[in-house]
Image (cartoon, grey):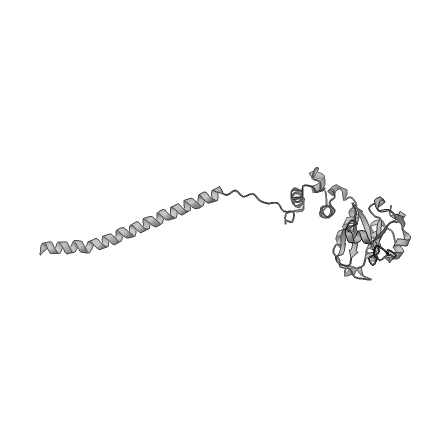
Amino acid sequence: MKNLFILMLVMGLFPGSFVLLSAQNNVNMDRASAHDKHSISLKFINGIEITPQVFPNTTAPVDEKVKLYSIANPNSKVSLASPEKNIESCTHFQFKFAMLMDREVESIKNLPLFSFINEWWAIRYRYGGSDQNGIDCSSFTEKLLSKVYGFSVPRTSTDQFLLCNKVATSNLVEGDLVFFNTRSTRRRRKGITHVGLYLGNNYFVHSSVQDGVTISSLTDEYYSNKFISGGRISSTR
């Protein structure tokens, strides 16, 4: 009887010990697994090499934008040779228009001109309009010539054309007017319907029907086909 009692006692304790031992083994395995995962994860993270890409469209300050633009566009004419001159001394719109027209920053010297353009930038086109609620091409050049060069010109593009001395495309300089017939074809190029102001490097500023006040290139197919002549008002020199 005594031996039977001892046997039952042992059998009663053994399952509990077995359960405890199994649970402990499970805990140890879970800890080891977690440790392995952690170790693998750290090795994976440490092995990553992140190389940031450079994009010109960034929220960085203006000087950083120009640096990034030049890195991303190595053929650009935006110059960084003299950082003190090009970055610290130049205005935000000098960078803006230098990049837009692919010119060196220091070539944007006429600050009253480009400040005026920046002030009117993207104002919508409105036929007969003459304020920032909408402005047409000839009113824009009229206001620009008056404020920047101190010269009064007629209100319409046709009258402005008649006032000017005609200038060949190859002889255009900043401040000259450029005239177009946007209703013309190659066979019929009479009359003036559009005017802008030349900025250099084949670019001109104007109030476009589609884009409002903007900068376009004389080399664009549309404008090259519609171009009539350049014009120079001597009093603007």
Q: Residue 38 location, x and y as percent?
A: 41, 46
Q: Residue 226 location, x and y as percent?
A: 82, 54
Looking at this view, name the residue that lies furthest to the top. Answer: 81
Q: Quadrant of residue 1?
A: bottom left
Q: Residue 100 vs residue 47: left or right?
A: right
Q: Is residue 214 visible?
A: yes
Task: Name the image quarter holding the C terminus.
Answer: top right
Q: Residue 83 vs residue 225: left or right?
A: left
| Residue 137 sits above or below residue 98 on the image | below
Q: Residue at the location (17% across, 53% down)?
A: 10
Q: Is residue 153 visible?
A: no
Looking at this view, name the residue that lies furthest to the left. Answer: 1
Q: Tell how many labels.
A: 0
Of residues 76 and 16, the one nearer the viewer is 76
Q: Residue at the location (35% across, 47% down)?
A: 32
Q: Residue 195 location, x and y as percent?
A: 83, 54
Q: Residue at the location (91% across, 54% down)?
A: 162
Q: Residue at the location (66% across, 46% down)?
A: 65
Q: Residue 199 location, x and y as percent?
A: 80, 47
